Image: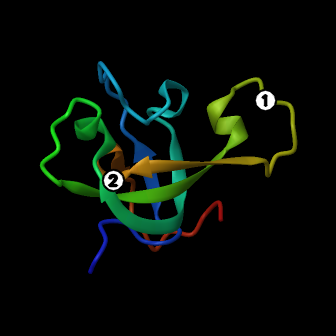
Amino acid sequence: MSTRFVLNQKVRIADRDAPGHVRTPVYARGKEGRIERVLPRFLDPEREAYGVNEGSETRLYRVRIKQSALWPDYDGQADDVLELEIYEHWLEQVGDHSDTEGR
């Protein structure tokens, strides 16, 4: 089964208001990172939280984001990263996925 995003692809976490139960942290919205791992599909937790159990699934990805991109005043090591598991409907493509800058 094909995936929308591939390993090392540059992505942006959507920057949108989403009332209610979501699994995408506010501090990561609008930030760019890279796909670190493509994970299986799971029941959509945003639909499940409201009892809309229709069996819809969505792909999960582990996204690696530089700490300095998340926190402007971050004073740790330049190569420190945070890895977040983000559902596919929260991710947007950025540029050409063959771009490997920032691996």
Tag 1 secondary structure: loop
Measuring from the top left, give residue 40's x and y in whole percent: 39, 68
Of the image marks 2 and 1, the number of the one nearer the N terminus: 1
Examine the image and state in which quarter residue 17 appears: top left
Farthest residue in the bottom direction?
A: 1
Residue at 36% from the left image edge and 48% from the top image edge:
91
The residue type indicated by label 1 comes to Tyr
| Position above or below: 95 against 97 | above
Q: How far across and down, in percent of the image, does residue 60 sit?
A: 40, 57
Name the residue beneath numbered marker 1: 74
Question: Dot 2: what SS?
Answer: helix
Per the rendering, the mark at residue 90 is none
Q: Nearer the viewer, mark 2 or mark 1?
A: 2
Going by the numbered disc 2, the residue's amino acid type is Glu
**How crowded is the residue under tag 1: few (<14 C-alpha within 10 Å), some, or many (20+)?**
few
- Mark 2 and mark 1: Cα distance apart in space: 28 Å
Foreground: 57 or 36? 57
Quarter of the picture containing the C terminus is bottom right
Please determine whether, in this image, residue 4 is positioned above or below residue 27: below
Residue at image coords 29%, 19%: 19
**Left or right: where does residue 99 sit relative to residue 77?**
left
Residue 71: x and y, percent?
68, 28
Residue picked out by circle 2 = 88
Q: As drawn, which residue projects farthest toward the left?
A: 54
Residue closer to the observer: 65 or 97: 65
